[in-house]
Each structure stands twice: as structure tokens, then as C-alpha cells.
Amino acid sequence: MNTLGFNKEPSKTTVVVAMSGGVDSSVTAGLLKEQGYNVIGITLQLYESKDSAKKGSCCSGLDIYDARRVAQKLDIPHYVFNYEKTFKKEVIDYFIDSYANGDTPIPCIKCNETVKFRDLMSFAKKLEADCMATGHYVKREGTTDKALMYRANDKTKDQSYFLFATTQEQLDFLRFPLGSLTKNETRDLAKKLGLNVHDKKDSQDICFIPNGDYKSFIKLNSKEGNVLDRSGKIIGKHEGIHNFTIGQRRGMGIASDKPFYVVDILKDTNEIVVGDRENLLGQSLILDELNFIMPDIDISLPVLQIKCSAKIRSLSTPVEGTLHKKENIFSFTFDSPIESITRGQACVLYDNERVLGGGIIKQKLN
């Protein structure tokens, strides 16, 4: 059994590596090449950037160039495929539509779910690859059948929140060589392997909005509406619900001695509701777009009650609660109230370190 779980020599095991041009995917390719695997690098061009060298972005022209240089250094085949149309349809349009509906989306989740895993994995299988590897910080355990996902050792870099939509079939085919490493260890390996990206900064912004100004990017037709307090009294005006997200404190243009927070966004009436910080607390939510990585649990049962933990922000700590299923509706109730349950964000489920799956928050219940 080789390190990727196959009963054959590494040299006879073909691995497609998704190479974004950053240090993580570059080290992934380098480690597997060093271990003797037959490595093929693939980079996806996802959008056309006016400034391809913009710092803080990813998947830009500069990143494609960096990925190509790494592949040359490692002496592995490298292919670049243009997925701009698919990316626009599956990720960018979804992002814009979500804000128009008063939700706060996470485009990285949708990108992993569609373009990077579904489409790229399909191509990897056409190449008759044994598996596909990425530079995500998450751990995978098990054989090629019914694998399980776990949080990365380095909790400051753990990316399981963004991968909850990974299907069982995809997880069986995927490998994550960096899940047991820290970021510093990855950079040290990049230096050891002689990779030019060893000191490349991590991407910080949404890749297709490298300046971070999503409001200008969306360019929705602004429709003025009312800002309400929790009693329904009009206390101000806003210039478009897409300019707001739950928990937001600034940018409301309301003069007050005490701070106001956005506590609700009413799409149907085009209104923003503001309140005190304690009004952000909630305990239950309804989930949509569900995915479960639970080969040992029968999710099809009409009624379920699973004690587990969940988090609604990528870098937060999972909080204990219970997943419920009744009348084909899934909900999650935290043991104690938490702040800023936000429509469009993910609620990811855990059993200690194991990732159970999750869904998109459709509604805050209380």
C-alpha cells in the first residue's frame, strides 16, 4: 500500500494535482513528485483580470505563470484550461444573485463544489488518473471507498469549512497531502524543493475581486429603501440591500449615541432592520443545499436527531448543538445562542475533528 492508499508502486500511480500557482498546491505537487508518483499538474484560468499581477488574488495570469514555472522545476506535465464561462455562471453569477437576494454568499465554497472538484475531477478521470490532489488544509482518512474528512492539524489554516459540499464520491477520489502540516512547514518544504513561490503571500480577497471592493464589482441597480429599528420605525434610508450583511455596524448613515448593527435584511420589502448587539444572538437555523459525509449514518430516515457541533464562520470554533430532521427539513440548534446567523453563509457540522458535512443557512429561526 503506497502513501496514497493504492496497492501499487508510486511510479505506477497517476495523480492529477490542481495547481493554483500558490505555495500550497506547488508543495503538494513537489511532495508527490519527490515520493515517486506520476504527477500531472493542471491549472484553471477562471477569470480575466485587468491587473493579472494584483497582489492578494489567486487564479490570475501571474498565478498561471507561477504554476507553469513550478511544473518546469519539478519536471512534470502541466496543462492550463480556460474555465472562464463555467466560473462566471457557477460562481460569479451566484455571488451577485445572492447579494441581490439579501444573502451573504461564500464564493470559495461554490468554486470548490463546482469548477475545482466537479469539473476538474471529471477531467482527471478522463486522464485515467488514480486520484486528484489539492493543497487544501484538511485531512482525509480511509481507503478509496467511503473515506472520511477531518479538520487539519493547523486550526489557523483549516479549510474544512469551505469543503463541506465535497461529496462522498469526490472525497474517495481526492487526496490532501498538507492536512498534517502547518503553513510554516509548507513554506520550509517549498524552500527545500527549490520552488520560487516559497515566499509568495497567501491570497486574502475573493479571487475575482482582488481589491476587495465587492460593492463596486456587483454593480447592481441600487434601489433605495428604508432602514428600520426593531419596532418597525423608519430611522433612515439605504441605497441598496446588497451593501449590507448581518452584523454590519458601519455604513448605515444613522446618527445615534449607541451603535446599531444590521440584524435582518428584508428582500421582499427592500428594508434593513437594525438593532443592538444582543439582537444578533440566535440559537436555531434552517439548512439548505445540504451535503453529508456520513457513510455510517442513514440520512434518508424521516426523523433524525444527531448530537454534533457546528460553526457558521470559517475560523470560529465549532459549537455544540443538535442536527434535526423532520418533515424533510433539516435544522440545527446550538446549545447556547451565538452571534450573527447569516443567510447565505455555511453551517458546517463536526463530530469532534471529523467533518460531517453541512449546508447553506436558509433562515434564522430564533
Image (cartoon, helix red, strand yellow):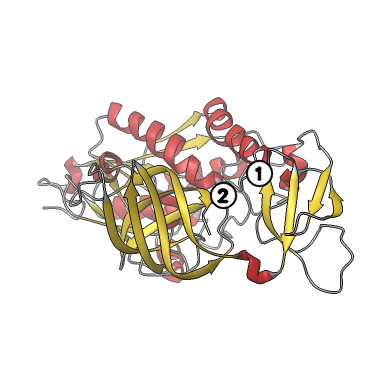
Q: Are marks 1 and 2 in contact (CB under 8 Å)?
A: yes
Residue 339 position within the rendered picture, expressed as x and y whole percent measured from the top left: 57, 67
Q: Hey, what amino acid is under mark 1?
A: Gly
Residue, disc 1: 102
Would you say residue 46 is visible in this rendering? yes
Secondary structure state at the residue bearing disc 2: loop
Would you say residue 135 is visible in this rendering? no
**Image position of 245 (left or right of 85):** right
Residue located 17% across and 41% down the image:
12
**Image position of 171 (left or right of 46):** left
Task: Residue 62: name its quadrant.
Answer: top right
Quote the CA–CA distance across marks 1 and 2: 8 Å
Residue 191 position within the rendered picture, expressed as x and y whole percent measured from the top left: 45, 64
Residues 77 and 119: in front is 119
- Using the image, determine if residue 217 lies above or below residue 261: above
Q: How many marks?
A: 2
Q: Which label was assigned to residue 343? A: 2
Residues 303 and 23: in front is 303
- Using the image, determine if residue 218 lies above or below residue 317: above
Residues 111 and 354: in front is 354
Q: Hey, what amino acid is under mark 2?
A: Arg
Residue 238 position within the rendered picture, expressed as x and y whole percent measured from the top left: 83, 48
Q: Earlier in the sequence, mark 1 or mark 2?
A: 1
Residue 362 position within the rendered picture, expressed as x and y whole percent measured from the top left: 51, 46
Residue placed furthest toward the bottom: 257
